[in-house]
Image (cartoon, rainbow, N blue to C red):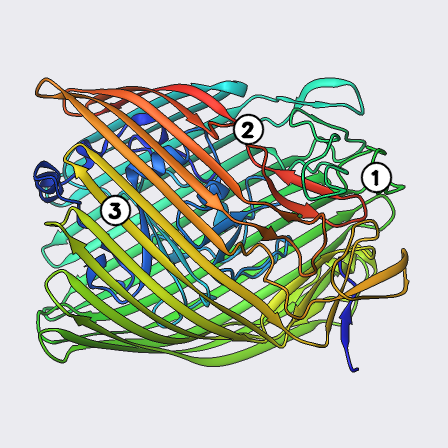
Amino acid sequence: MSYRFLTARSLLASSTILAAAAFGLATPAAAQDSETAAEAASGQLPSIIVTANRREENLQDVAVSADILDQGRIDNIFAAAADTTALAGSVPGLNVESSNGRVAPRFYIRGLGNTDFDLAASQPVSVIMDDVVLENVTLKSFPIFDVERIEVLRGPQGTLFGRNTPAGIVKIDTVKPSQETDIRMGLSAGEYGTISLNGAVGGAIVDDILAFRVSTQLQRRSDWIDNGFTGQEDVLGGYTDFAIRGQLLLTPGDNTDILAQVQFRDLDGSSTFFRANVLGPTNELNGNYDRDTVFYDAGGGNRADYQQWGSTLNISHDFGGATFTSITSYYESQGSSRGDVDGGNLVTGPGFIPFPSDTQDSIDLWQFTQEVRLASNTDGPLTWQVGAFYFESDFDVTTVGFTFPPPVTVNHTNEAWAVFGQASYQLTDAVRLTGGLRYTDDEKNFIVVSGAAPQPVSVQDDQLDWDVSLFVDLSDDFSVYAKVADAFRGPTIQGRDVAFFNPPSVAQSENIMSYEAGFKTELADRRVRLNGSVFYYTVDDPQFTAVGGTGNLVQLINANEGEAFGFELDSAFQITPNFEISLGVAYADTQINDTALEVGTCAQCTVTDPTRTIAGPFGPVVFAAVDGNPFPNAPKWSGDLTAQYTLPIGDNDEFFIFTDWTYLGETNFLLYESVEFNADSRIEGGLRVGYRGNDGEYEIAVFARNITDEDNVLGVVDFNNNTAFVNEPRVIGVSLGFNY
């Protein structure tokens, strides 16, 4: 048998929304416009607006599988000062996790993602904030606050958005300036010294010409984790995360808008807390696990310190019949995270590492993007848009590994450009055909700045992506669609292993071909909404990462093929004008198809794949054949449930109760399968109960996140001692909010 093998080896994110953000400032009633308020008064579900086609449209009229998180839902997700990973499971088919604390989250949609923990990692899910792609993993962690909505677009979005979207997009739209005065403030306090202070102020500077908005957020938690190795109590786990955004909107005439935005973040906190030997002999957390204690002999306190800032200039002009848009952005990210990656000196268990595995990675990055678009804005049967996009980034990554290798700094540069277009034609009153094309040229270069010096590496690829969809209105309330899409993720260079005396690894482009069909319907006078889709896709040369193993390496690989099929169902029910339930469920069956691919495994775990053994730099290395295995971090089942009930009190006040629950099914964390390194089904819930007064001008509430205090494994490190990291603890708190 021929074979290929590799020695194998996260005031953020989340945040409360200024607009009442996670701690009760804003209320759905206060945030509604007149149309939505009328819908609510009539007992109908509110309309959902999406921008999947770079223009505002009703979700029910768009050939895309999408779910939207509005202000109220986002407020609750981040009520305990969580980070971006709190989005995991909030949309069926979406998973988010990180092994770098409150930075460098990893996103997965329909099972497709990347477990690479390097700061240069590439992902097939794009995060876009205010029409700007946040390409680097550290930028993807920029705090989510003062947000109007989050759209999760499932499936390839390569035509209009580009930049590595074969799995989908997480699209974040912040609240923009307006001429109306808007003042919001919120304060919450909870267990573990959790405090969140947020606020926003905006309004007119010059009537009808110039408006502003300033929003800010401060999240803080005290140290709450003991170090059992040193005997110190409450010395780890704290953080201070501050973010601020300023915006100016200039409207010099009826046809021109100029929006300037600047935002900044300063994080001083903790990286991920790895816990040694907490798995085995099964995949359940064993007696070595104690949420409040770790046993660190290294890691320097597992510190994470980051500063990020970005600026965007968005100019649009209506020429009459077509709108021209220019979006220019510049972002920077500097910082480092350090950790005791083997989970510390806890000898009890099957594995032991005879040296402190203290690793620090840091980044110094800038990113520039420029996009121009020209889009029709008439009401005829034909709508169209064309555009061009330019992307450039340059960053250094420095790795300090363990106690024996010297620090190594590597440099990555990336330059890409694209031209694109999309047209949609209303063939009949009931049938609409849409098609798009995008040509992309993507080039990456890698050099070693200091340390061991292998030869420079360069990769380049150019691809033509396309998609076509057919949307049919079978009635006023029921539509069906079909979509075929082709997209790619450019080649990637992984250089972290240079710090451990190994050459960089390279993965060539991955190409996805996706087939999707779905339906969209609203029933019972728009008191019931049911949207569903089925999908099948294949990925040629999918990019995966072989992580850890006895050799403790991180190497990019291309499998021969990946394959997946499944479905999504999103539903909402307006039981009464004051009682609403939403329920979503997704199924994704993923599989690696490569009879020749083998990856290194851990030394102490129980591998269930076919294996063989060869000599390695740290001793014998067991290789596992991964053909037929699921994608890493790709649970087959996922779902979410929300319920909200309000009880009017008088004409202007109300009592409310809101609960939300997420579910992620059984999950294999690595490319190979073992008894220990997978998770059983995981469920987490939240609750918020409170009182809103004077049409939502003020609110007082109590909240709980992870209300049942679940201990869920979110990820593992397969470096010979069954290390894992877990979810956030239960946090119960109170909040006050003011909205004027």
Instruction: Tell me if label 1 and label 2 are in contact, CB under 8 Å.
Output: no
Q: Nearer the viewer, residue 441 or 532?
A: 532
Please state which amino acid type lies under the numbered disc 3. Answer: Ala
Q: Are marks 2 and 3 in contact (CB under 8 Å)?
A: no
Position of residue 195 relative to residue 114, above or below, is above
Residue at image position (19%, 54%) is: 257
On screen, residue 56 versus residue 399, left or right, reads: left
Residue 345, image quadrant: top right
Q: CA distance from mark 2 to mark 3?
A: 29 Å
Identify which residue, 705 or 627, lies in the foreground: 627
Q: How many marks?
A: 3
The percent position of residue 324, horizontal first and vertical second, equals: 22, 67
Residue type, numbered disc 1: Pro
Asked whether the viewer can see residue 665, the reply is: yes
For the residue labelled by badge 1, is the local secondary structure a helix, a strand or a loop? Answer: loop
Tell me, for residue 722, which label it has, or none: none
Residue 636: percent from left, percent from top: 51, 56
Of circles 2 and 3, the one toward us is 3
Mark 1 closeness class: few <14, some 14–19, many ≥20 residues within 10 Å: some
Q: Earlier in the sequence, mark 2 or mark 3?
A: 3
Distance of mark 3 from mark 1, alpha carbons?
A: 51 Å
Q: Which residue is tagged 3? A: 572
Name which residue type carries label 2.
Pro
Q: Residue at x 51, y 60 (%)?
A: 111
Give the residue at mark 2: 729
In the picture, measured across the screen, residue 458 lies left or right of residue 9, that is left
Q: Which residue is mark 1?
A: 356
Q: Earlier in the sequence, mark 1 or mark 2?
A: 1
Which of marks 1 and 3 precedes in the sequence?
A: 1
690 lies left or right of 364: left
Q: Report helix, strand or loop for mark 3.
A: strand
